[in-house]
Amino acid sequence: MSSPSSRDLLEWGRPRLRDLPWRQTRDPWSVLVAEVMLQQTRVDRVVPRWGRFLDRFPDPAACADARVGDVLREWSGLGYNRRAVNLHRCATQVVAMHGGDLPADLDALLALPGIGSYTARAVLAFAFEEDVAVVDTNVARVLARRAGRRLTTGGAQALADASVPDEEGWAWNQVMLDLGALVCRARRPRCGECPVSGGCAWQGSGPDPAAGSAGVSGTQSRFEGSDRQGRGRLVAAMGRGPVAARHLAAVMGWPDDPGRSEQVAAGVVADGMAVRSGSAYRLP
């Protein structure tokens, strides 16, 4: 992206930024919680839950001091419960290795449980206001379309890194996220509303270069009847109390397939979201 496009995009985007509660803070833990929640969960579902979670676990120490089961209960309904387990593990390591404060260093962030390339850079950009680029599925789609070709993971990150204007890391990344979410959408992109369409190699014409490009999510597998649904039902049930092994199949929605329920439950235990005590399963 050229410098004029950068200026145009910032001028367009600043007054249009979505009013999201985590954009009002620079607290690293609060930013991290938001970014973890937003992984594969819609913004409208995260908004009411983010503040509630932070009321209960306002910093890494509070999260680390809690039982994993308490964190899972507070996470209930957001899906992908393994994220809650990883967040607890992350908090524990932050307390043990960093004095309870998230580090402002990319390698140190990447070394924490459950933190990948996007999340680490999001903490640096949105909490510490570093001039680093974050690349989620929306940003990756914008980059591929502007480049007019499929991108590798490294290629997408390199393009993003080169585009961040000096001392504008926070604003630039927020604007890019909103551009991809609201204008350069996966379906029915609003090319006529794009403030930097002149620098786009695709402009809605011909095969979409974002299809199959690194970082651009594809069609999600069916949830209804899936193992993910069964896992979620088990975790939700354990939030209300222990689940007897003989009730697993009914609780997970497969009353006629106890073998499947036992196999999936074993995976829930292996992922740290449950423990088996005698003939019952409970939250850890």
Image (cartoon, rainbow, N blue to C red):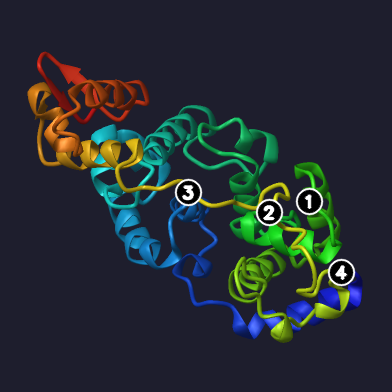
Crowdedness near tag 4: few (<14), some (14–19) or many (≥20) residues, C-alpha within 10 Å: some
Tell me the residue that label 1 is attached to.
Answer: 156
Tell me the residue that label 3 is attached to.
Answer: 36
Please tell me which residue is depicted at 36% across the width and 35% down the height of the picture: 64
Q: CA distance from mark 2 to mark 3?
A: 14 Å
Q: CA distance from mark 3 to mark 1?
A: 21 Å
Looking at the picture, which amino acid does disc 1 mark? Ala
Tell me the residue that label 4 is attached to.
Answer: 201
Looking at the picture, which amino acid does disc 2 mark? Val
Looking at the picture, which amino acid does disc 3 mark? Val
Looking at the picture, which amino acid does disc 4 mark? Ala
Please tell me which residue is depicted at 43% across the width and 56% down the height of the picture: 41
Q: Which label lies toward us, 2 or 3? A: 2
Q: Which label lies toward us, 4 or 1? A: 4
Q: Position of residue 63 (x, y in %)?
A: 35, 40
Element class at badge 3: helix
Q: Position of residue 272 (x, y in %)?
A: 34, 26
Left or right: residue 132 compared with residue 187 = right
The numbered mark, 2 or 3, whose residue comes first in the sequence reads 3
Q: Which label lies toward us, 3 or 1? A: 1
Element class at badge 4: loop
Tell me the residue that label 2 is attached to.
Answer: 135
**Front-most of 242 and 30?**
242
